[in-house]
Image (cartoon, grey):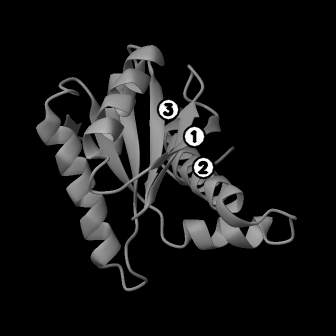
Amino acid sequence: MELVSLKQLFQRLSSGGRLLGLDVGSRNIGLAVSDPKCRIASPHSVMYRSNTTTLKNISRLESLVQEMNITGLVIGYPLELTGFQGKQGAQVKLFAKELQMSGRFPNLAYVYWDERLTSVAVTNVIGSMDITGRRRKNIVDKMSALCILQGCLDSLSRIENGTHGFASQQS
């Protein structure tokens, strides 16, 4: 497993494959997957996370990578509002290191994606829905992963179109 730049991830996608978005929390990991053309993200599932489930989660991710032809991971990275790494950011990096050290993902690329306040935004959007408890948390986790992945897909599209985040100028 290799940490790459967004441009390097774009280059790797030229040979095909999907991306898997991860919203890594202290208790759950929300998952979202891209379509085969890496244009649209869809919510996938939620994995429970604890100290005793690490190997199980690595095995489940390995199965998903194989079954869905995953080329890369987009891992949500929650920076503090100041722009610096906080406690949760350190936990996300530890999780990525565990995946890397497992040796099960030798050809998989990954990027970190700034996800400041993603879960807060998703919670606000679904706030008026009549959904409570664990079901609500699972929806927030999956939709947060979707937002993380879709943000990355949109940036990859801009790289492909040569705009790199700037509106193209027309004569």
Q: Earlier in the sequence, mark 1 or mark 3?
A: 1
Q: Which residue is mark 3?
A: 160
Apparent side of residue 107 relative to residue 63 in the rendered image (left or right): left
Query: In the rendered structure, which amino acid carries the disc numbered 3?
Result: Glu
Q: Against 131, is 47 above or below?
A: above
Residue at screen point 52% across, 52% down: 148
Within 10 Å of the Cα at label 3, are there few (<14), some (14-19), or many (20+) other Cα atoms?
Answer: few
Q: Which residue is mark 1?
A: 45
Q: Mark on residue 94?
A: none
Within 10 Å of the Cα at label 2, are there few (<14), some (14-19), or many (20+) other Cα atoms?
Answer: many
Apparent side of residue 104 relative to residue 126 in the rendered image (left or right): left
**Which quadrant of the figure has residue 42?**
top right
Q: Quadrant of the C terminus?
A: top right
Residue 59 appears at what percent x and percent y? 31, 30
Residue at screen point 87% across, 65% down: 130
Query: In the rendered structure, which amino acid carries the disc numbered 1?
Result: Ser
Q: Are marks 2 and 1 in contact (CB under 8 Å)?
A: yes
Q: Quadrant of the N terminus?
A: top left
Q: At numbered mark 1, what does the secondary structure look like: helix, strand or loop?
A: strand
Q: Which residue is mark 2?
A: 142
C-alpha distance separating marks 3 and 2: 27 Å
Residue at screen point 61% across, 73% down: 120
Residue 108 appears at what percent x and percent y? 27, 28
**Which quadrant of the figure has residue 100?**
top left
**Which quadrant of the figure has residue 38?**
top right
Q: At numbered mark 3, what does the secondary structure look like: helix, strand or loop?
A: helix
Residue 93 appears at what percent x and percent y? 24, 58
Q: Against 114, is 82 above or below?
A: below
Q: Extreme bottom residue here?
A: 82
Residue 31 appears at what percent x and percent y? 52, 43
